[in-house]
Image: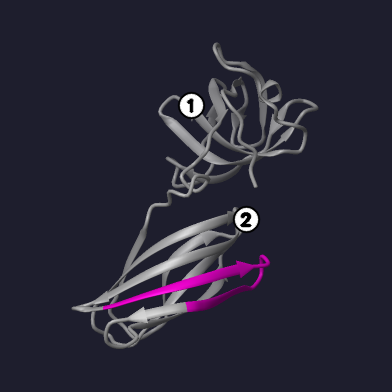
Amino acid sequence: MVVLVNRAKMSTSTTGTGTITLGSAVDGYQTFADAGVSDGDVVRYVIEDGDNWEIGTGTYTATGTTLSRTVIESNNSDSAITLTGSAEVFISATAADIGIIPATTATTATTSETAIATYSTTSYSSAKLIVSVTRGSDRQVSELLVVHDGTTASATEYAQVYTNASLATFNVDIDSGNVRILATPSSATSTSYTIKEILVDA
C-alpha cells in the first residue's frame, strides 16, 4: 500500500525521465521527510512540469533524497514525461486510493475471446471487478476476483446473475505487462460491457 501524507510538495532540478533528486519544499508546503515519509516508503506522486504531468508510484530514498518513478498515467501517452529541471512533485491520493474508479467500457461483435479491460501488473497485484453486460434487452452482471504473480493471472467468477441467459464468460491472462480481462460472448450480436474495478496495489 502506498504512503499518503499531508501537504508534501517539493521542487526538483532533475532533467530527463529517470529517478528524481528532490530539492527543497515549495513555499507553504513541507518536505516528504517532514510530512512523515520514511526511507524506503512507496508513495503516490504527481509531477507537474509546465503543461506536462505524470502520476505514479515511487520509492523514497532518504540518502540523496531521491524518488523513483513507476508511471501509472501521464499526458505523454502514460509514459514518463521528460523533466526540464523546473518541475514540482507532490504526494497525492488518486481515484484508485479512495475507491472512486472510472468505469471501463467495451463492445464486442464476435464469439471470439476478446480483451475488454486491462491493468498494470507492476502497479496492482489483485482486483475485484463487477462486469455489467448488455445485449438488446438482455442483461447480465458478473463479479470476479483476479490475482497474479507477475507471470500468470487467475480469476474466479463467484457471482453471475442474468435476465434471460448468460451473455458472456470471462477469463484473464497477462500480456505485455498487463492483466487482461477477457470476455467470450455467447453471440456475435453486439454486446456492451461496463467494468468497475477495485485495484489493490502490488
Residue that lies at the very extreme toward the top in this rendered image: 27
Q: Is residue 148 left or right of residue 46?
A: right
User: Where in the figure is residue 40, as x and y percent of width and height?
Assistant: 76, 38
Question: Which quadrant is home to the C terminus?
Answer: bottom right
Residue at 66 percent across and 25 percent down: it is: 32
Residue count near mark 2 (Cα–Cα under 10 Å), binned few <14, some 14–19, many ≥20: some
Q: Residue at x 47, y 63 (%)?
A: 118
1 vs 2, front mark: 2
Q: Which mark is residue 122?
A: 2
Residue plotted at (56% across, 45% down): 71
Question: Quadrant location of residue 24?
Answer: top right
Q: Position of residue 154 (x, y in %)?
A: 60, 75
The numbered dot on residue 23 is none
Residue that sits furthest to the left in the current view: 137
Residue 144 colored in magenta in the image = yes
* Nearer-N-terminus badge (1/2): 1
- Please state if 160 lies on the left or on the right of 60 as rendered: left
Q: Amino acid at mark 1?
A: Asp
Question: Element under label 2?
Answer: loop
Find residue 58 and report its horizontal and vertical position in percent.
Answer: 65, 40
Q: Amino acid at mark 2?
A: Thr
**What residue sits right under mark 1 in the picture?**
49
